[in-house]
Amino acid sequence: MKSTIRIMRKIYLLGTLLCAWMLAACGSSHDEPELTKNRTVLVYIVADNNRLASLAIDDFNEMKEGMLNSACSALNLLVYIDTGSNPRLVELKKSKESVEEKVLVQYENDRNSCGLAETQEVFRTVFDNEAYKADGYGLIYWSHADGWAPYQNPNTRWIGQDNGTGDYRMNLDDFVTALQSVPHLDFLMTEACFTSTIEVAYALRRAAEYFIAFPTEAPGPGAPYDVTVPMMAAAGTGAALKMAEAYYDYYESMYDGSVQPTNSHWTAGIALCVLKNAALDHLADATATALQTAQGWDGMAGSDVFDYDQRSDWSGHVGYYDMDQLMRLTVTADAYQVWKSAYQAAISFWKTTPKNYSDVYGLLFSMEGTNGVSHYIPSADAPASYATAYRATEWYQAAGLKALGW
């Protein structure tokens, strides 16, 4: 159950945000319309795994609250939810004083929600349906993740985890393939840990205008969907930034920097980034050009770069290093300044509380000097499969990382 404190805070924030929303929507006829004419959003929840099922149900209920509180009737909100039983695709429809759960498809309990074919099936059921054709589209992928990192074999960079009949993760390349089943998105959001990596963002850049992601571990309770759902209907590509701002503000308002969090009252902060995908090819070119000024790579320099991955005492540590700091230490000062302009053009939103929390590490850690997007740095301690997988990423090729001997 959600704590009374959390509910009271959400009511306060929701009221504040909706007031601002309604005022904007009621502007003069000379203003650009605040709401889109029509947008279809799919939330794809993979929660048939450890610890996430109850949180997924909480978020699903918040989505219903968000639809009820929304001033916009032009939002088609569909949710695929698999918590280990009763996996289903649901449309949430607002009707006066209530929200109806309309089950579109009921699936078998042993469904692997991380499978490529299964994911494509859901995507096509939604986005190929004439009833949900729209002026704009959005997708939220909700589950565990670990950036680009290999899982089980050299070719796997995973997102999602399904433990129903085994231990299944989705290859990042498969996720890219699955996204070919959807129309071009106004926003793609990964409600999952460590996905604001340049390697992941670059792989997904063609799918959406904006990519919303976390450089650290995501807050345990996930988005306050009762607040963010009304933002999904913002006109044009404004939805991504409105959602990110509301998401950040909600957790920033509870942050105290000292109290160990619980999922019913998350006081441990948040770090959230929105990338403008159209700028990522230029960033790759700028990175390749800047790296031509690098004098090789001194592995010790990595110790001077902030690591968003605080799992230092756990075999699962990957290392997600601050990209801006990495470039500043690696290339010449003049090359860095040129590169920095390209980097800033790619960041549409970046905010962090002073500290964030690592569940495995079990403590808050400072976020001072961080810049929102991580980059891998090879380590002698990493499995041999990491090198093979990393060199196969699109980013490695496009950014000219061979110049560093990686």
Image (cartoon, rainbow, N blue to C red):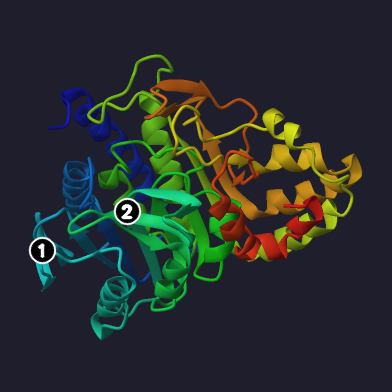
Q: Nearer the viewer, residue 342 or 311?
A: 311
Q: Where is residue 155 in the image (x, y as percent from the top left)?
A: 50, 63
For residue 184, which numbered disc appears in the image? none
Q: In this view, does 352 lie above or below 296?
A: above
Q: Position of residue 394 (x, y in %)?
A: 62, 66
Q: Nearer the viewer, residue 262 or 10?
A: 262
Q: Name the residue under label 1.
A: 109
> Disc 1 marks which amino acid?
Asn
* Label 1 packing within 10 angstroms: few (<14), some (14-19), many (20+): some
Task: Please give the name of the residue rendered at 14% of the width and 54% of the height, measured from the top-left corner.
Answer: 84
Q: Position of residue 101 (x, y in %)?
A: 10, 62
* Label 2 packing within 10 angstroms: few (<14), some (14-19), many (20+): many
Considering the numbered disc 2 on the image, is that residue within a helix, a strand or a loop? strand
Of the residues tagged 1 and 2, which is closer to the observer? 1
Considering the numbered disc 1 on the image, is that residue within a helix, a strand or a loop? loop
45 relative to 277 in the view: left or right: left
> From the image, which quarter does the N terminus lie in?
top left
> Disc 2 marks which amino acid?
Trp
Q: Mark 2 points at which residue?
A: 142
Q: How many labels does the image show?
A: 2
Q: Which quarter of the picture shows residue 26? A: bottom left
Q: Which quarter of the picture shows residue 102? A: bottom left
Q: Which quarter of the picture shows residue 90? A: bottom left
> In terms of sequence position, does the residue under pointer 1 or pointer 2 come before the other?
1
262 relative to 354 in the view: left or right: left
Task: Please give the name of the residue rendered at 25% of the width and 64% of the height, measured from the top-left corner.
Answer: 113
Q: Is residue 313 above or below residue 114?
A: above
Task: Please give the name of the residue rendered at 80% of the width and 41% of the height, measured from the top-left corner.
Answer: 330
Q: Where is residue 312 in the image (x, y as percent from the top left)?
A: 50, 29
183 relative to 130 in the view: left or right: right
